[in-house]
Image (cartoon, helix red, strand yellow):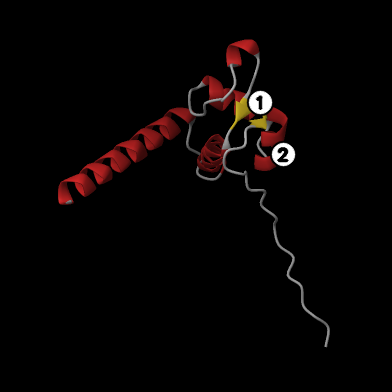
Amino acid sequence: MPEKRSVGLQVNEPSPGVVYSLDAVVHLTGVSRRSILVYCKSGLVHSAGDPQQGEFSFDDEAIYRIRRVEHLRSVHGVNLAGIRMIFDLMNELQRLENEMRFHRS
């Protein structure tokens, strides 16, 4: 009996501690170069390089953030201001959870 092989979407996961060029991030995320630069300019994503010098590089956290921004924008239709608000609320929730953990111990 022939062996069944599943064919699925291959997701390229970034490696922790590695810094990627803008072109590599475009490949890893499937997000356009222009969109990534807009996300950086709007403050939603931070480059590990110096954008003033035209040096855009990104770590694994920035790549995950780019993917979250793109998902909220393209799938749910949230604009950049709404995404910023969502991220701010998520950060506040994390801060409060950490504070609760501290007070319980």
**Label 1 amino acid?**
Arg
Q: Name the residue under label 1.
A: 34
Rendered image: mark on residue 16:
none
- Residue 55 pos. (x, y %): 65, 18
**Circle 2 — which element?**
helix
Between 47 and 75, the one nearer to me in the picture? 47
Q: Contact (CB < 8 A) between labels 2 and 1?
A: no
Residue name at image x 68 percent, y 32 percent:
32
Residue positioned 56% across, 25% down in the render: 47
Q: Which of 41 and 12 is in front in this view?
A: 12
Q: Which residue: 66% across, 25% down?
A: 34
Q: What residue type is labelled 2?
A: His
Residue 61 % position (x, y): 52, 38
Looking at this view, name the residue that lies furthest to the bottom. Answer: 1
Q: Nearer the viewer, residue 46 or 49?
A: 49
Residue placed farthest to the right in the image? 2
Residue 65 vs 50, above or below: the answer is below
Q: Which mark is residue 27?
A: 2
In the image, taking residue 65 as reference, residue 57 lies left or right, namely right
| Picture quarter with the N terminus | bottom right
Quadrant of the image occupied by residue 50: top right
Which of pointers 2 and 1 indicates the residue nearer the eye? 2
Judged left or right of residue 73, residue 94 is left
Q: Earlier in the sequence, mark 2 or mark 1?
A: 2
Instruction: Say which quarter of the image contains residue 2.
Output: bottom right
As drawn, 88 above or below 47: below
Residue 95's spot in the image, x, y percent?
Answer: 28, 39
Disc 1 secondary structure class: helix
* Structural crowding at the residue carrying mark 1, measured as other residues with C-alpha within 10 Å and reported as few (<14), some (14–19) or many (≥20): few
Q: Distance between the residues labelled 2 and 1?
A: 13 Å
Mark 2 surroundings: few (<14), some (14-19) or many (≥20) residues within 10 A: few
Identify whether 50 is placed above or below 14: above
